[in-house]
Amino acid sequence: MTLRVSYGPWGETLEELVQAGRDAEEAGAEVLWVPEMHRSATVTAAALAAGTSTAAVGTAISLAFTRSPMVTALEALDIDELSDGRFILGLGTGVRRLNEDWHNAQWGRPVPHLRETVECIRTFWQGCTSGAPLAVEGEFEHLRIRGYQRPFPVRRPQIPIYLGAVGPLMTRLAAEVGDGWISHELCSPAWLRERVEPEFAAGLARGGRERRDLDVVVSAACSVDPDPAVARRRNAGLVGFYATVRTYSEFFEFHDAAAEQAQVIEAFRSGRSADDLASEVPDRAVQALTLAGDRDEVAGRIAAYDGLADTIKLTPPTHGLPADQTRAAQKEIIALIAELTGASR
């Protein structure tokens, strides 16, 4: 298998999360990814960078519009220094309500806004130690910096930037300007092959690039247990959570799960919490949309991405679960990573 294996460690505390990262690193995970929702992605990435030694550390994703491009650029430089050049800056837009209502952030048209954000960050990295003026003029983001010179050395003037994308336009942008693309947590091999790959081709052509210039990272909600039924039920909450979002209706329809999504939405409208919908998701939908089963079964499902993606990002189930179940699932995933990479031999 040529697929690189990476992992998104979980912990009730930062200490536990970093330990899980060390365990996954020892098991052979090549990248450790951290999200941004209940923790700051950059702070968590810094903790992992300090607590590990060989695996790359990436944000998957850091919200692009809730920090200024300069702050994002500075945080990335600092984490890259802390990790001795192991950092990957994964950026995503989030949705309008999250940006405007939760973060009081500007929301431009997402694709051009993110394009300008990436340009500002890269411009800053390239010139921040020179003392020369830095200028980027955009519709949504700009840099107009004079009289500034970073007095500290820069570990790398161009840190890899990966873009999280679901829709076709954002996926094309990732292929055009990104060093990598990060999928949604629900992304089957069939969806990747039939709906996503054509957008890669369009974006790469626009950027004058080759497929080898883009690291395709498929995110996979993963639940491993000696009892496959237990594994599937752990992942059901995540499927239920995303089924409440009508934006994903095309994805559910593609997998013949429109009826299951409608059932979840009805339960959600009746007052059920988005984290309490596992009972509305049948095993068939869990099996179609996530990686769930014993180690052999999940290993076989992972192999189906080989040749389509370059890297797989495994993450443990959390939605609607007590911590002990997530912890048990995480232990099994890390053991599976060791088997896949040969570290357990």
Image: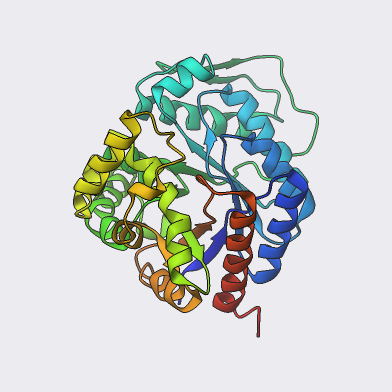
Between 228 and 76, the residue placed more toward the observer is 228
Residue at 75% across / 27% down in the picture?
Answer: 150
In the rendered image, residue 37, in percent from the top left (x then y), is placed at 56, 34
Q: Residue 134 location, x and y as percent?
A: 59, 21
State how the image is colored: rainbow
Query: In terms of image quadrants, where is residue 235?
Result: bottom left
Q: Identify which residue is drawn at 19% across, 54% down.
A: 256
Vertical arrangement, residue 83 with respect to residue 76, above or below: below
Q: Position of residue 132 (x, y in %)?
A: 66, 22
Q: Nearer the viewer, residue 76 or 57?
A: 57
Give percent across and percent down for residue 162: 49, 45
305 relative to 115, above or below: below
Q: Quadrant of residue 53?
A: bottom right
Q: Quadrant of residue 32?
A: bottom right
Q: Is the C terminus in the top left, top right, bottom left or bottom right quadrant?
A: bottom right
Left or right: 125 in relation to 297: right
Let me know if residue 71 appears in the view.
yes
Reply above or below: 128 against 310: above
